[in-house]
Amino acid sequence: MKIRLPVVASVVVFSVIACVPRDEGIDSDGTWVGTITTEGDVTTVINESGSVWGGTARLVEETSIGVGAGDDAYMLGRVMSLAARDGRIYVLDNSIPTVRVYDLAGTHVADIGRGGNGPGELGRPREGGPTAIAFDDAGRLYVKASNRILIFSAAGEPLDTWTMDRPHGEWGGFGMAITGEPAAILAENPVRCPEYRPWGCASRILAASGDGTPEDRRQVPDLGYETPRIEVTFDHGHGPEFTGGTPTFVPELVWTVDAEGGLVVGRADRYEINRYAVAGAAETGPRMVVSKYWEPVPVQDDEHDWYLMRDRLQTSFESVTSVGGYDLDDSLPRHKPAFQRFVAGADGGLWVVRPGPGEQRPGCAPPTSERVEMVMNPCWHDRPIFDVFGADGRFLGQAEAPEALGAARSLAAMFQTHPFVDERMLLAVIEDESGTIMVKRYRLVLAGGQ
């Protein structure tokens, strides 16, 4: 079946093709035009031009939670996970550890869980403390803490604890979804590696049944792409050890877990994203392919040189005996990858976070030879571009990143804590220049104020 209309049938999974220049440009009236093809179980949606919104949307701040000093209920520390349900905002703070609950105006209304390892207790900060939260369809709250998943009622009462048969440290879980069985789908580092840990991240998925028994590990489909990496060998006197990392601007395999426990995977050397069903994953293949024209963002000369110096310093550990893999002497890519991360919405939609034009930090010192300084206080950052797709695969349009969300510190916070999206609401962690951690609630406002 093949359809070409400014309307679309309902579909379920994503994948996108490489950048190919077009002469056509976007329709002047903003009408979405595309081609939909269904063959067997796979639906392909080609976003040819225009968008559903017909313009760029704005993210308008409506709530800010978090202060630098004051009431403990608003002093946020190590925020690990966010969620919203039934007019409440849930903030998992590993530094306490507890789940703070606020209303949509940002007023603190309750806490769920506390420190410790007993029933209803979420572990201890930074020592196997909580890392992810998710709701099931009945409104029960699940909290992943070390090798346990704690289950609470909507009122915050402890209901059950699943003990995972895996030693602490074997898997972390920065993402979690609860499917209808219920079963937990846990993902370790389902996002791009953050700046503070540039030498590689694990990419693992663990499925567990309703009593917490691990069922299987799911492999993230590689889509036929191997990310170029720098390989470093070093020796502290106990034999050779190996590490590695992806150079700046080199495309990576990006993936996340959606609200139904499925996989969203894309190779960033092209605008390609695949969304897989809850069961089967790599074995059954994606259920939808979506394509959209992509114009690569160029890397500025000064931006390129600064990151090249930083990546070279990343290989200057003590006791390094060899450096191989990606050849930094051949320089870095002159265009940025198609995307950096995916945010799967609770409504089934998908937000694609793309690296926008580079911005230099005001007053940034000349290039330094201090590796830690260059990693922790980068002179450059990308203002993000949000491409938003509906659950049916159509390109809805772009959302303009607010000034606060596009700042360097806030971008680092966003890459450490997965944002939460549900229809036209976005929750994200912000860190201002003074180091205050805040959770912001934004409302998506379409062109024309809709």
Image (cartoon, grey):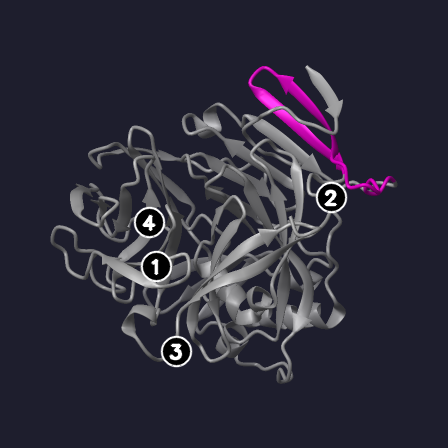
For label 1, count other residues whose C-alpha is less than 10 Å away and answer few (under 14), some (14-19) or many (20+): many
| Labels 1 and 4: the sequence-earlier one | 1
User: Which residue, given by chain and number where applicable, does mark 4 sit on?
Assistant: 133
Q: Label 2 is placed on what type of residue?
A: Gly
Instruction: Judge whether 419 appears above or below 366 on screen.
Output: above
**In this orientation, which residue lies closer to the viewer: 371 or 289?**
289
Q: Label 1 is placed on what type of residue?
A: Tyr
| Labels 3 and 2: the sequence-earlier one | 2
The numbered dot on residue 102 is 1
Q: Label 3 is placed on what type of residue?
A: Gly
**In this orientation, which residue lies closer to the viewer: 318 or 150?**
150
Residue 315 seen in render: no
The answer to whether the residues at label 3 and label 4 have Cβ atoms under 8 Å apart is no
Quarter of image, res 438:
bottom left
Instruction: Judge whether 304 appears above or below 179 on screen.
Output: below
In space, the residues marked 1 and 3 are separated at their CA atoms by: 18 Å
In space, the residues marked 4 and 2 are separated at their CA atoms by: 35 Å
The answer to whether the residues at label 4 and label 2 have Cβ atoms under 8 Å apart is no
User: Which residue, given by chain and number where applicable, does mark 3 sit on?
Assistant: 68
Q: Label 4 is placed on what type of residue?
A: Ile
Q: Residue placed at 32% from the left, 63% from the top?
A: 108
Q: Residue placed at 68% from the left, 35% from the top?
A: 291
User: Which residue, given by chain and number where applicable, does mark 2 sit on?
Assistant: 54
| Labels 4 and 2: the sequence-earlier one | 2
Q: Where does the magenta region start and end?
A: 24-49
In space, the residues marked 3 and 2 are separated at their CA atoms by: 40 Å
